[in-house]
Image (spheres, helix red, strand yellow):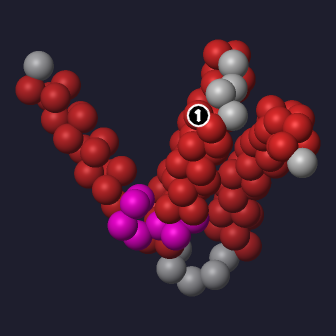
Amino acid sequence: MKKFLLGFVYAFQGFAILVKSERNFKFHLFAFLCITIAGFYFQIEKTEWLAVLIISSVILTAEALNSAIEKLCNHVQPEIHPAIKSVKDIAAASVLISSIIAVLIACIIFLPRINKLI
């Protein structure tokens, strides 16, 4: 049980590292806060909330994994290396892909509501 609970401690420490040191993670966390506020303001439906929460968790997870991969790559190979560059670029692409899908989801959910206000 102690190891199980320690896993949570380590996970929260990792989250704190992300929030303190990773600019892109902070940006995505801020975007998540903004989209959450917009969801409450526009009173989005339950299924829309599910889409927002799922894609938000995908983006935050992708960004966390991207940061971990970058830190590991920088530790293993501090100098620029073509193979390490490819690994880091591919990890960054996962964040880009999920972010593009998130923007599309946000447009589908929020643009009709915004148009009603105009």
- Residue name at image x 88 percent, y 38 percent: 116
Q: Is residue 41 left or right of residue 74?
A: right
Find out whether residue 22 is within the magenta segment.
Answer: yes
Residue identifier under label 1: 40
Main SS of residues in magenta: helix
- Residue 22: x and y, percent? 47, 67
Q: Is residue 103 left or right of residue 8?
A: right
103 and 25: which one is in front?
103
- Residue 27: x and y, percent? 57, 62
75 and 7: which one is in front?
7
Find out whether residue 1 is within the magenta segment.
Answer: no
Above or below residue 14? Residue 23 is below
Image quarter for residue 96? Answer: bottom right
Read off the magenta span.
Answer: 18-24
Q: Is residue 25 left or right of residue 80?
A: left
- Residue 72: x and y, percent? 47, 62
Inspect this view and state whether residue 97 appears: no
Local packing at callout 1 (Cα closer than 10 Å; few below 14, some 14-19, many 20+) is few
Q: Amino acid at mark 1?
A: Phe
- Residue 74: x and y, percent? 50, 72
